[in-house]
Amino acid sequence: MKAAISETGADKRLLWIGLLTAAAVVLSGVYACATPFAALAALAALDIDRRDGLILVGVIWLANQIVGFGFLGYPQELQAYAWGIAIGAGAVAGFLCARVLVTAIASTNRLLAAAAAFGVAFVAYQAVLYAATFILPSSEGAFSFAVVSYVATVNAVAFPVLLAAHRVAVAVGVVSRNILEGAATMPGAQGV
Protein backbone atom coordinates (compact mmCIF):
# COMPACT_ATOMS: atom_id res chain seq x y z
CA MET A 1 0.00 0.00 0.00
CA LYS A 2 2.78 2.43 0.93
CA ALA A 3 4.58 1.73 -2.36
CA ALA A 4 1.38 2.50 -4.29
CA ILE A 5 1.06 5.82 -2.48
CA SER A 6 4.70 6.66 -3.27
CA GLU A 7 4.18 5.81 -6.95
CA THR A 8 1.07 8.00 -7.05
CA GLY A 9 3.02 10.89 -5.50
CA ALA A 10 5.85 10.41 -8.00
CA ASP A 11 3.35 10.17 -10.86
CA LYS A 12 1.73 13.42 -9.74
CA ARG A 13 5.09 15.20 -9.50
CA LEU A 14 6.04 13.97 -12.99
CA LEU A 15 2.66 15.07 -14.34
CA TRP A 16 3.12 18.53 -12.79
CA ILE A 17 6.64 18.79 -14.23
CA GLY A 18 5.21 17.74 -17.61
CA LEU A 19 2.43 20.33 -17.44
CA LEU A 20 4.85 23.11 -16.52
CA THR A 21 7.19 22.01 -19.30
CA ALA A 22 4.34 22.16 -21.81
CA ALA A 23 3.48 25.65 -20.56
CA ALA A 24 7.14 26.64 -20.86
CA VAL A 25 7.23 25.40 -24.47
CA VAL A 26 4.29 27.67 -25.26
CA LEU A 27 5.92 30.55 -23.38
CA SER A 28 9.19 29.90 -25.24
CA GLY A 29 7.35 30.30 -28.51
CA VAL A 30 5.81 33.56 -27.33
CA TYR A 31 8.67 35.13 -25.35
CA ALA A 32 11.79 33.29 -26.66
CA CYS A 33 14.66 34.62 -24.52
CA ALA A 34 12.27 36.14 -21.99
CA THR A 35 10.77 32.82 -20.92
CA PRO A 36 9.91 33.40 -17.24
CA PHE A 37 12.61 31.20 -15.74
CA ALA A 38 12.70 33.21 -12.51
CA ALA A 39 8.94 32.80 -12.00
CA LEU A 40 9.19 29.07 -12.71
CA ALA A 41 12.17 28.75 -10.35
CA ALA A 42 10.28 30.56 -7.57
CA LEU A 43 7.22 28.36 -8.06
CA ALA A 44 9.41 25.26 -7.86
CA ALA A 45 11.07 26.58 -4.70
CA LEU A 46 7.63 26.92 -3.07
CA ASP A 47 6.44 23.55 -4.18
CA ILE A 48 8.79 20.64 -4.60
CA ASP A 49 11.95 19.20 -3.16
CA ARG A 50 15.38 20.18 -4.37
CA ARG A 51 15.91 17.20 -6.67
CA ASP A 52 12.54 17.60 -8.39
CA GLY A 53 13.04 21.36 -8.56
CA LEU A 54 16.35 20.91 -10.33
CA ILE A 55 14.75 18.38 -12.68
CA LEU A 56 11.90 20.82 -13.38
CA VAL A 57 14.25 23.72 -14.10
CA GLY A 58 16.49 21.51 -16.24
CA VAL A 59 13.65 20.03 -18.28
CA ILE A 60 12.07 23.45 -18.84
CA TRP A 61 15.44 24.90 -19.88
CA LEU A 62 16.01 21.99 -22.29
CA ALA A 63 12.53 22.42 -23.78
CA ASN A 64 13.20 26.14 -24.21
CA GLN A 65 16.47 25.44 -26.00
CA ILE A 66 14.86 22.85 -28.28
CA VAL A 67 12.13 25.33 -29.23
CA GLY A 68 14.66 28.13 -29.74
CA PHE A 69 17.21 26.23 -31.80
CA GLY A 70 14.76 23.87 -33.48
CA PHE A 71 11.85 26.15 -34.32
CA LEU A 72 12.64 29.82 -33.63
CA GLY A 73 15.83 29.97 -35.65
CA TYR A 74 18.37 30.68 -32.92
CA PRO A 75 21.75 30.83 -34.67
CA GLN A 76 23.68 27.56 -34.67
CA GLU A 77 26.78 29.23 -33.24
CA LEU A 78 29.01 28.52 -30.27
CA GLN A 79 28.13 31.84 -28.61
CA ALA A 80 24.40 31.08 -28.90
CA TYR A 81 24.90 27.69 -27.26
CA ALA A 82 27.00 29.34 -24.54
CA TRP A 83 24.23 31.86 -23.88
CA GLY A 84 21.79 28.95 -23.64
CA ILE A 85 24.02 27.38 -20.98
CA ALA A 86 24.19 30.73 -19.15
CA ILE A 87 20.39 30.93 -19.16
CA GLY A 88 20.21 27.41 -17.72
CA ALA A 89 22.78 28.28 -15.04
CA GLY A 90 20.80 31.41 -14.18
CA ALA A 91 17.58 29.43 -13.84
CA VAL A 92 19.28 26.88 -11.58
CA ALA A 93 20.83 29.66 -9.47
CA GLY A 94 17.41 31.32 -9.20
CA PHE A 95 15.83 28.08 -8.00
CA LEU A 96 18.57 27.25 -5.49
CA CYS A 97 18.63 30.76 -3.99
CA ALA A 98 14.84 30.87 -3.75
CA ARG A 99 14.79 27.39 -2.23
CA VAL A 100 17.21 28.37 0.54
CA LEU A 101 15.19 31.49 1.31
CA VAL A 102 11.82 29.71 1.29
CA THR A 103 13.13 27.00 3.58
CA ALA A 104 14.46 29.62 5.98
CA ILE A 105 11.35 31.81 6.25
CA ALA A 106 8.34 29.75 5.13
CA SER A 107 7.39 28.77 8.68
CA THR A 108 7.33 32.42 9.75
CA ASN A 109 5.42 34.11 6.94
CA ARG A 110 4.24 32.16 3.89
CA LEU A 111 3.23 35.20 1.85
CA LEU A 112 6.58 36.88 2.49
CA ALA A 113 8.31 33.62 1.54
CA ALA A 114 6.49 33.55 -1.80
CA ALA A 115 7.24 37.19 -2.62
CA ALA A 116 10.85 36.86 -1.50
CA ALA A 117 11.28 33.63 -3.49
CA PHE A 118 10.24 35.45 -6.63
CA GLY A 119 12.50 38.44 -5.93
CA VAL A 120 15.53 36.33 -5.06
CA ALA A 121 15.00 34.01 -8.05
CA PHE A 122 14.81 36.99 -10.39
CA VAL A 123 17.90 38.69 -8.96
CA ALA A 124 19.95 35.47 -9.00
CA TYR A 125 18.85 34.69 -12.58
CA GLN A 126 19.74 38.18 -13.80
CA ALA A 127 23.03 38.21 -11.86
CA VAL A 128 24.20 35.06 -13.64
CA LEU A 129 23.24 36.51 -17.02
CA TYR A 130 24.95 39.80 -16.20
CA ALA A 131 28.11 37.94 -15.16
CA ALA A 132 27.99 36.06 -18.48
CA THR A 133 28.21 39.37 -20.37
CA PHE A 134 31.81 39.68 -19.15
CA ILE A 135 32.70 36.41 -20.88
CA LEU A 136 30.26 36.00 -23.76
CA PRO A 137 29.60 38.35 -26.65
CA SER A 138 26.57 40.58 -26.13
CA SER A 139 25.23 43.84 -27.40
CA GLU A 140 25.50 47.02 -25.35
CA GLY A 141 21.74 47.03 -24.85
CA ALA A 142 21.54 43.46 -23.51
CA PHE A 143 21.22 44.73 -19.96
CA SER A 144 19.57 48.04 -20.67
CA PHE A 145 16.79 49.22 -18.41
CA ALA A 146 14.26 48.46 -21.16
CA VAL A 147 15.41 44.85 -21.57
CA VAL A 148 15.64 44.06 -17.85
CA SER A 149 12.30 45.71 -17.13
CA TYR A 150 10.67 43.73 -19.97
CA VAL A 151 12.04 40.46 -18.58
CA ALA A 152 10.95 41.53 -15.07
CA THR A 153 7.45 42.29 -16.35
CA VAL A 154 7.15 38.93 -18.12
CA ASN A 155 8.23 37.16 -14.92
CA ALA A 156 6.03 39.32 -12.67
CA VAL A 157 2.98 38.52 -14.80
CA ALA A 158 3.88 34.84 -15.08
CA PHE A 159 4.40 34.26 -11.34
CA PRO A 160 0.81 34.88 -10.16
CA VAL A 161 -0.48 33.01 -13.23
CA LEU A 162 1.72 30.04 -12.29
CA LEU A 163 0.53 30.26 -8.67
CA ALA A 164 -3.09 30.24 -9.91
CA ALA A 165 -2.34 27.25 -12.17
CA HIS A 166 -0.86 25.49 -9.16
CA ARG A 167 -4.01 26.19 -7.18
CA VAL A 168 -6.12 24.68 -9.98
CA ALA A 169 -3.77 21.67 -10.12
CA VAL A 170 -4.25 21.22 -6.36
CA ALA A 171 -8.03 21.44 -6.74
CA VAL A 172 -8.08 18.68 -9.36
CA GLY A 173 -5.64 16.53 -7.41
CA VAL A 174 -2.60 16.77 -9.67
CA VAL A 175 -0.28 18.16 -6.96
CA SER A 176 -0.22 18.75 -3.23
CA ARG A 177 -0.57 22.18 -1.69
CA ASN A 178 2.56 24.31 -1.66
CA ILE A 179 3.74 26.39 1.28
CA LEU A 180 1.73 29.41 0.16
CA GLU A 181 -1.45 27.33 0.07
CA GLY A 182 -0.80 26.04 3.55
CA ALA A 183 1.14 22.81 3.24
CA ALA A 184 2.10 21.77 6.74
CA THR A 185 5.82 21.59 6.00
CA MET A 186 8.22 22.46 3.28
CA PRO A 187 8.40 19.38 1.04
CA GLY A 188 11.79 17.75 1.22
CA ALA A 189 13.14 20.43 3.56
CA GLN A 190 15.92 18.10 4.63
CA GLY A 191 17.19 18.18 1.03
CA VAL A 192 17.55 21.94 0.84
Image: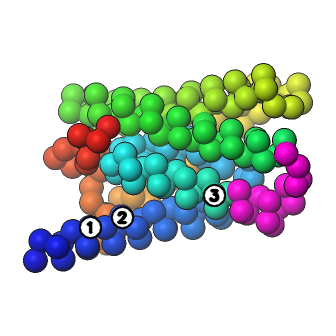
CB-based contact (under 8 Å), mark 2 and mark 1: yes
Asked whether, in this view, residue 1 is left or right of residue 89, the answer is left
Can you say whether 41 is above or below 141 in the image? Answer: below
Location of mark 3 (residue): 62
Location of mark 2 (residue): 13
Location of mark 1 (residue): 9
Q: Residue at x 56, y 49 (%)?
A: 158
Taking the magenta stretch, the answer to whether it contains residue 52 is: no
Look at label 1 and name its amino acid.
Gly
Circle 1 sits in a helix, a strand or a loop, which is it? helix
- In the image, the segment drawn in magenta is 65-78
Can you say whether 6 is above or below 65 in the image? Answer: below
Asked whether, in this view, residue 164 is left or right of residue 93, the answer is left
Residue 81 percent across, percent down from the top left: 78, 47
Label 1 Cα neighbours within 10 Å, binned few <14 / some 14-19 / many ≥20: some
Reading the chain from its start, which is encountered first: label 3 or label 1? 1
